[in-house]
Image (spheres, grey):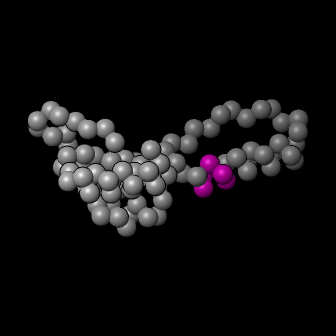
Amino acid sequence: MNDRIAIGAMKAILEGGLQVPSNVSIVGFDNLDVTAWTHPTVTTIDQQVELLMATAASVLMQQIRDPETEKHQAQLIRPVLKNRMSTGPVPLSGKTAVA
């Protein structure tokens, strides 16, 4: 789920009387700035959008400068897990919830 949905889910979980991360762990996907300001802070995945855009622009500019250039190989840009306070160990009871 993206970070906005994760924040909304966390709010609903807390209002429902459960604890994050004691009862439910939440992970978002976007690394929006607001995830560092929530309580608890939201664990998220940083897609490294700036690096993705810079790499794509560089490849495109090279192709514009030299259309005869061989096709570029795919470049892997790894996402980065920002481990914050909304995730924790699985409860000992073995019961899990999916949000």
In percent of width and height, residue 22 lies at: 18, 49
Q: Specify the principal SS of the magenta part.
A: helix
Relative depth, front residue between 49 and 7: 7
Give the number of callouts.
Answer: 0
Seen at 88% across and 39% down, the residue is: 67
Res. 68 in view:
yes
In percent of width and height, residue 5 lies at: 44, 51
Res. 88 in view:
no
Query: Does residue 42 sit above or below 97 in this rendering?
Result: below
4 magenta-colored: no
Is residue 27 toward the left or the right of residue 50 in the image?
left
In percent of width and height, residue 24 lies at: 25, 45
Seen at 20% across and 51% down, the residue is: 18
User: Hey, which residue is sitting farthest bottom in the picture?
Assistant: 37
In percent of width and height, residue 25 lies at: 28, 46
Query: Does residue 97 sit above or below 81 in this rendering?
Result: above
Seen at 17% across and 34% down, the residue is: 95
* The residue stretch that appears in magenta: 50-54
Is residue 81 toward the left or the right of residue 66 in the image?
left
> Quarter-wise, where is residue 70 in the image?
top right
User: Hey, which residue is sitting farthest front in the picture?
Assistant: 16
Q: Quadrant of the N terminus?
A: top left
Query: Does residue 7 sit above or below 99 in this rendering?
Result: below
Q: Quadrant of the C terminus?
A: top left
Relative depth, front residue between 20 and 81: 20
Seen at 19% across and 39% down, the residue is: 90
Is residue 72 toward the left or the right of residue 45 in the image?
right
